Image (cartoon, helix red, strand yellow):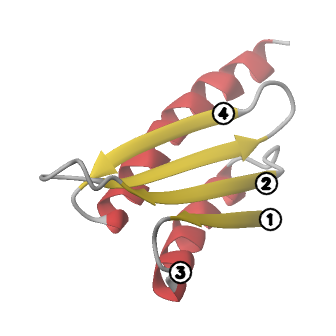
Amino acid sequence: MTVNFQYVGVDVSETLNSFSEEKLEKLFNRYEFLISATVRFKHDANSHTKGKICDIELSLPGPRIFATSDEAQYEVAVRETISDLERQLKKRKEVYKTH
């Protein structure tokens, strides 16, 4: 499992890295065809209520899968993004099973 972290306008956080890796590890264990993940954390200064953005792009055979979420806390954004990715992965796995 290869996970690349990018922080855009945000200080690097080791706790956020370990939290994200822990959540992504569950996906990597469930879906063995995953190759790597790129996780991007951004802060939107224009948003007054939310503004903590998490983008995750998964590399796998076929087209890449991407999800993003904008929440008040990065941990919540990571959870939301991963649940979106999981939905997409379930659909992709169904496509693999039919062949």
Q: Nearer the viewer, mark 4 or mark 3?
A: 3
Q: Which residue is mark 2?
A: 36
Residue 62's place in the image compared with 89, above or below, is: above
Q: CA distance from mark 2 to mark 1?
A: 5 Å
User: Which amino acid lies under the numbered mark 2 shown in the image of this protein?
Assistant: Ser
Q: Nearer the viewer, mark 1 or mark 3?
A: 3
How crowded pointer 3 is (Cα within 10 Å; few <14, some 14-19, many 20+) is rated as few
| N-terminal-most mark, 2 or 1 | 1
Mark 2 touching mark 1, by CB under 8 A?
yes
Badge number at residue 65: 4
Quadrant into which the C terminus falls: top right
* Helix, strand or loop status at disc 4: strand
Q: CA distance from mark 4 to mark 3?
A: 24 Å
Residue 69, percent from left and from top = 38, 44
Residue 9, percent from left and from top = 47, 65
Badge number at residue 11: none
| N-terminal-most mark, 1 or 4 | 1
Badge number at residue 2: 1
Residue 89's place in the image compared with 12, above or below, is: above
Q: CA distance from mark 3 to mark 2?
A: 20 Å
In this picture, residue 40 sits left or right of residue 34 = left
| N-terminal-most mark, 3 or 2 | 3
Q: CA distance from mark 1 to mark 3?
A: 18 Å
Q: CA distance from mark 2 to mark 4?
A: 11 Å
Mark 1 touching mark 3, by CB under 8 A?
no
- The residue positioned 83% from the left and 50% from the top of the image is 35
* Helix, strand or loop status at disc 2: strand
Q: Which residue is mark 3?
A: 12
* Helix, strand or loop status at disc 3: loop
Residue 2, percent from left and from top = 80, 65
